[in-house]
Image: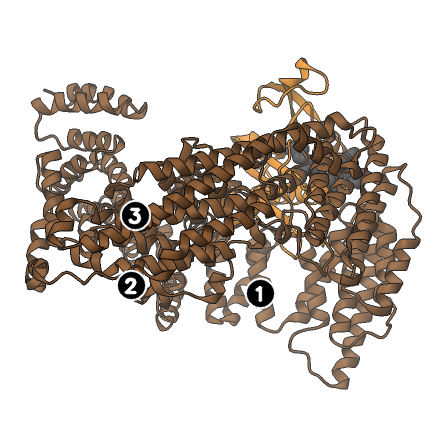
Chain colours: A orange, B brown
């Protein structure tokens, strides 16, 4: 059915990894999920249908010193059959909101593989922009659309400055 | 030597330990211990290296020495923590830290370590007391909260009696209200506070917190706190207020969280609604209002968000349920308009499924609406609509509409449309899912359903071939792989199933939730008997996840305490429990044991080891984490699901299956073993698992092992039931001989003590005591040998007949399908293994003589000879069947049977490839199982 924006509970880790056998999504180890939940539970959430089907999830964290204190999107994924229904947008919105309001972060940033054109377009559409390219952030993923060059060049996406952000 | 010098010499030892060079760590420790024989840190490091090199007994000796000295030094404590964890001795770890803290009560860090040791062991009561003490002493708020949540966790622990729970919550409440700073300074403290108030029904107090500015602000950012707030409001009957709040979020803030829509819906039909006309009128007014809100949302969001239209559907569904619907056509109309809007989205089918369990005229109306839709396969939206229409129509097919002819024409249609629609995704890289994938999945489903109706294997061939082809176009489509794994198991082609299973590239917890698709009853395909450990290894590798869970999750519970993320702690604990006590974990273990016994010599060591492990498992309170929902199911609701259809032998195994096999094995191993409970208790090194609270587990083991429950037995195939009956008869028959011959516990313990002393040079601790206790309590124990041995009894009919009847059963199974032949053959082999395990004790000539077992041994010999003769026949028949498999004829048959799915794309060469892999795989497994049977027979002669 529709999107319940729920907490990402440890139990979600059991479900999440079943749903998203997806090439673009790293499937993380238990300790990865738990380390996020034991520190930033409010920056992690799932989109769940009332019948329990998990449609997507987002994991984020807060990090940085002084003026660099910000929210970071670590993982975002939506199951193929639930795409293009604004679920990703909702989760990003929520993460930005919590990052601003609860963590008082100055901006939100994230990394995307340069080969993941779809996600790049999406983030750009949401106002994010590239500010630096990073090498070898992800593990190797085979050859990208544009061959070798793109395979190991990765974009780190934007600090989108929030003009209304609170001072530290 | 100076402390600094010693430290310098310790460095390489730490390095060796870090890099896993335990041997060199031991050597280095020994060298330094010569100079510093009383250095406890050296001893602790050596103990650690010993544990890590599996030298448990030697490590234990050192451990006891160090613990006796009551260390307080940080380095020693840390090293010992690892040692004791490695030994599974949490109790010792707790007392070690308690002792240390007692000696240095001002040491805050030791206090925290003691607290954590109790947390790891789930000793909430002690944890709570320690935290309280720490709070008094160190005056830190966090320790107060530690004690609060410890009280809550103790209250929630299943072993806490209900009356006690209330008291504990009251204690938690008293503690939390004594805090100097209010809980709303921190979302997790606030959450803890609210959850206590909710539990105690102290809503007034909760509202005060919630109405406070800080409370409101927390609820606006913290989903967890907001959820609690909603619960409290609901518990208070404030449905209307909650609904109004939700409405303002939806309308003003454009919140599209479905939970808000549910709040509005709940407010329309509050659970406490009266059942009179006035109430109905009011309700109608609320319905109208909600409808106008949802309609406006739907209008505004258009195709961007489906919350509005879905809320309208749910509103109408509930109106009907409450008898408040005033328009019989509305639901159908809403569905139609939903389809008109979202019919081209992939989620459409799952979205509307809960609303369409129609029959009669309404169904006819809905069906004709769907059928009348004009869709074309030339655009992506048309394709997705077509797929949804197929799924929706198929879902409501009635039993009378499903027969070989109609299913065949559906299968052909789906398959044809799949091929026709492929060009739409031609541009996509193979790493992308193809838009037409679902048509292939539908066709595969229809073919499997055809096989189920007709029992004609050709339909499985068609399904496999078509899905294999679809996978070449959409390499990442794991749904297709899941289906293929199941189909190849049915076809008796396990190596191909395994290949696809590996292609899924499961990671982490997926091993727990998904490995069932391959590993359920995998011993049917195991070639461990021939030395090929592929499946056995798969079991072990899959089980890795449980080991890392036990180690890691407790660490994160501790971390959540230090980070004060109290809302997460109960979750983490529940999660650890779910994995620790996972049904799948133990099902894999059971399969592995079944494989292991076909491969390894059955020694008393293995018997004892597996016995203890299986007994632990038997006492667990299992959680079923298996994911079945992920297996695509587009079968009509009047039929079995795809998962049910493709379960081996038509029986999905679950807890009942596991418990039955556990009982079977535990009973046999127990008879064969010298370990009774007294001995086991003394020889056990780690702590016992937590007690299961199920009253059934309180019965004596002897009784539990004999209990047969229909609901459990219903998960067994008829051949498994036959094996069960045989093993029961066998165990009943031989029990009295085992009980008579088994040495007295004191003898077993004395022997164990002797062995340990030989190995380590130290006596086994606690044994002398046990020997005395037993001697005293059971004075005539030693005299058992003087009793007359039980009279020789003829073996029961069920045992004598077993191998003859399984021979004829095998012939029938062989005619039916390769996988059934494998099933019966491996069960026959297992029956022989039971015979071996159960009769090993009677082998030594001295035993036979002392206990006058002559006649018994004669019966066993006859049984064994008969069994071996039967097994050899089965083996020969399997070899013959194997020879027929990988032949040109067989492949040709396969290819011919796939004519329905062959096209210009799926050509002869392609089908040949599939046919070859299936028949090769079958040949290998039939041949291997056959050869393995002979090996098992000869190694246990
Ligand atoms: C990327 C992903 C998270 C998008 O999820 P989603 O729920 O479908 O996205 P939304 O519906 O919220 O889309 C938001 C916007 O992104 C853009 N967008 C998303 N998917 C798009 C697509 N397939 N084509 C074009 N634009 C797209 C659109 O602009 C869209 O807004 P619109 O629908 O109003 O036009 C999802 O495709 C996914 O899980 N992919 C795999 C994992 C991944 O790549 N994660 C990102 C790396 S961190």
Residue B837's tag is: 3
Q: State the residue in front, B926 or B745.
A: B926
Does the rendering let one see residue B736?
yes
Q: Nearer the viewer, mark 3 or mark 2?
A: 3
Does the rendering let one see residue A161?
no
Secondary structure under tag 1 reads helix
Residue B410 location in percent, x, y? Answer: 82, 48
Q: Residue at x 52, y 66 (%)?
A: B206
Q: Earlier in the sequence, mark 3 or mark 2?
A: 2
Q: In what quadrant of the picture does the C terminus of chain B appear?
A: top left
Q: Few, some or many C-alpha atoms within 10 Å of disc 2 (few <14, some 14-19, many ≥20)?
A: few
According to the picture, the residue beneath numbered tag 1 turns out to be B231
> Mark 2: is the Cβ under 8 angstroms from ligand 1?
no
Q: State the residue in front, A15 or B414.
A: B414
Do callouts 3 and 2 mark residues in contact (Cβ within 8 Å)?
no
According to the picture, the residue beneath numbered tag 2 turns out to be B702
Q: Answer above or below: position of B419 versus B664.
A: above
Task: Give the chain of mark 3.
Answer: B
As drawn, is A13 to the left or to the right of B550? Answer: right
Q: State the residue in front, B483 or A66.
A: B483
Residue A164, quarter of the rendered image: top right
Secondary structure under tag 2 reads helix
As drawn, is B283 to the left or to the right of B337? Answer: left
Same chain for marks 3 and 1?
A: yes
Q: Answer above or below: position of B457 versus B204.
A: above
Q: Nearer the viewer, mark 3 or mark 1?
A: 3
Q: Residue at x 16, y 18 (%)?
A: B5
Task: Give the chain of mark 2.
Answer: B
Q: Residue at x 89, y 37 (%)?
A: B379
């Amino acid at each position: 059915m529709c999107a319940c924006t729920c907490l990402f509970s440890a139990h979600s880790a059991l479900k999440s990894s079943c749903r998203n056998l997806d090439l673009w999504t790293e499937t993380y180890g238990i300790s990865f999920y738990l380390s996020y939940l034991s520190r930033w539970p409010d920056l992690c959430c799932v989109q769940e249908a009332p019948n329990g089907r998990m449609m997507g999830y987002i994991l984020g964290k807060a990090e940085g010193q002084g003026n660099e204190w910000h929210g970071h999107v670590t993982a975002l994924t939506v199951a193929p059959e639930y795409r293009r229904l604004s679920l990703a947008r909702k989760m990003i919105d929520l993460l930005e909101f919590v990052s601003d309001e609860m963590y008082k972060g100055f901006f939100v940033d994230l990394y995307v593989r340069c080969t993941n054109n779809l996600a790049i377009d999406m983030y750009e559409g949401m106002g994010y922009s590239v500010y630096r390219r990073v090498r070898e952030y992800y593990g190797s993923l085979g050859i990208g659309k544009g061959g070798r060059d793109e395979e190991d060049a990765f974009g780190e996406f934007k600090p989108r400055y929030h003009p209304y952000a609170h001072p530290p | 030597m100076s402390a600094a010098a010693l430290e310098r010499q310790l460095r390489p030892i730490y390095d060796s330990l870090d890099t896993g060079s335990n041997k060199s760590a031991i050597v280095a420790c020994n060298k330094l211990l010569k100079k510093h024989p009383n250095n406890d840190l050296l001893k602790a490091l050596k103990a650690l290296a010993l544990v890590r090199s599996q030298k448990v007994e030697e490590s234990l000796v050192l451990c006891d020495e160090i613990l006796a000295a009551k260390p307080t030094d940080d380095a020693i404590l840390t090293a010992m923590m690892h040692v004791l964890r490695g030994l599974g001795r949490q109790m010792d770890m707790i007392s070690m830290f308690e002792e240390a803290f007692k000696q240095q009560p001002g040491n805050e860090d030791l206090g925290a370590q003691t607290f954590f040791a109790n947390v790891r062991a789930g000793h909430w009561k002690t944890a709570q007391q320690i935290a309280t003490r720490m709070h008094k002493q160190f005056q830190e708020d966090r320790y107060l909260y530690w004690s609060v949540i410890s009280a809550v966790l103790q209250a929630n622990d299943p072993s806490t009696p209900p009356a006690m729970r209330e008291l504990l919550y009251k204690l938690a409440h008293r503690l939390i209200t004594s805090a100097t700073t209010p809980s709303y300074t921190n979302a997790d403290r606030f959450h803890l506070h609210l959850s206590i108030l909710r539990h105690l029904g102290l809503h007034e107090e909760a509202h005060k917190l919630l109405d406070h500015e800080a409370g409101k602000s927390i609820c606006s950012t913290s989903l967890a706190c907001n959820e609690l707030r909603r619960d409290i409001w609901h518990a208070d009957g404030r449905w209307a207020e909650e609904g109004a709040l939700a409405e303002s979020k939806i309308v003003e803030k454009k919140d599209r969280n479905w939970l808000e829509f549910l709040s509005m819906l709940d407010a329309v039909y509050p659970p406490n609604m009266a059942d009179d006309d006035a109430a109905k009128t009011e309700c109608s007014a609320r319905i109208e209002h909600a409808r106008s809100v949802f309609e406006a949302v739907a209008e505004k969001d258009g195709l961007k968000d489906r919350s509005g239209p879905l809320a309208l559907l749910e509103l109408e569904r509930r109106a009907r349920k409450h008898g408040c619907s005033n328009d019989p056509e509305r639901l159908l109309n809403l569905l139609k308009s939903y389809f008109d809007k979202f019919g081209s989205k992939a989620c459409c089918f799952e979205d509307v499924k809960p609303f369409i369990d129609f029959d009669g005229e309404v169904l006819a109306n809905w069906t004709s609406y769907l059928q009348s839709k004009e869709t074309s396969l030339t655009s992506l939206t048309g394709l997705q609509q077509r797929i949804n229409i197929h799924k929706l129509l198929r879902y409501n097919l009635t039993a009378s509409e499903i027969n070989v002819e109609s299913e065949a024409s559906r299968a052909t249609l789906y398959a044809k449309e799949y091929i026709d629609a492929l060009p739409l995704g031609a541009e996509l890289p193979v790493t992308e899912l193809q838009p037409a994938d679902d048509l292939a999945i539908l066709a595969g489903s229809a073919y499997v359903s055809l096989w189920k109706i007709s029992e004609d294997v050709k339909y499985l061939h068609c399904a496999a071939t078509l899905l294999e082809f679809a996978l070449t176009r959409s390499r990442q489509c794991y749904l297709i792989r899941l289906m293929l794994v199941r189909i190849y198991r049915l076809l008796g082609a396990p190596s191909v199933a395994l290949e696809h299973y590996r292609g899924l590239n499961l990671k982490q917890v997926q091993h727990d939730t998904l490995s069932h698709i391959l590993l359920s009853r995998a011993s049917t395909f195991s070639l461990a008997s021939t030395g090929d450990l592929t499946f056995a290894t798969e079991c072990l590798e899959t089980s890795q996840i449980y080991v890392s869970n036990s180690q890691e999750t407790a660490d994160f519970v501790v971390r959540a305490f230090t980070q004060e993320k109290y809302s997460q702690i109960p979750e983490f604990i529940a999660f650890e429990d779910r994995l620790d006590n996972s049904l799948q974990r133990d099902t894999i273990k059971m399969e592995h044991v079944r494989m292991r016994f076909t491969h390894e010599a059955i020694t008393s060591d293995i018997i004892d080891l597996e016995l203890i492990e299986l007994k632990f498992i038997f006492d667990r309170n299992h959680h079923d984490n298996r994911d079945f929902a992920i297996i695509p199911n587009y079968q009509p609701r009047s039929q079995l699901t795809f998962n049910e259809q493709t379960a081996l032998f038509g029986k999905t195994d679950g807890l009942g299956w596991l418990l039955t096999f556990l009982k079977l094995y535990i009973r046999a191993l127990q008879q064969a073993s010298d370990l009774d409970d007294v001995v086991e208790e003394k020889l056990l090194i780690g702590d016992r698992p937590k007690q299961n609270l199920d009253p059934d587990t309180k019965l004596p083991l002897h009784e539990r092992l004999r209990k047969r429950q229909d609901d459990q037995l219903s998960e067994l195939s008829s051949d498994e039931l036959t094996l069960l009956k045989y093993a029961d008869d066998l165990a009943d028959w031989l029990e009295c001989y085992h009980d008579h011959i088994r040495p007295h516990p004191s003898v077993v313990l004395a022997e164990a003590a002797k062995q340990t002393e030989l190995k380590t040079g130290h006596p086994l601790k606690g044994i002398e005591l046990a020997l005395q206790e037993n001697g005293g309590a059971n004075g005539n124990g030693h005299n058992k040998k003087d009793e007359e041995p039980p009279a020789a009894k003829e073996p029961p009919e069920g045992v004598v007949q077993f191998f003859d009847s399984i021979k004829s059963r095998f012939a029938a199974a062989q005619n039916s399908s390769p996988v059934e032949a494998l099933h019966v053959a491996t069960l026959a082999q297992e029956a022989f293994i039971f015979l071996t395990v159960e009769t090993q004790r009677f082998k030594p000539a001295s035993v036979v003589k002392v206990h006058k077992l002559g006649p018994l041994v004669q019966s066993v010999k006859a049984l064994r000879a008969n069994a071996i003769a039967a097994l050899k026949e089965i083996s020969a028949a399997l070899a013959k069947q194997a020879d027929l498999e990988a032949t040109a004829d067989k492949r040709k048959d396969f290819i011919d049977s796939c004519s329905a799915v062959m096209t210009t794309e799926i050509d002869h060469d392609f089908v040949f490839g599939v046919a070859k892999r299936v028949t090769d795989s079958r040949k290998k497994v039939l041949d291997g199982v056959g050869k393995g049977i002979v090996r098992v027979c000869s190694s246990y002669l």
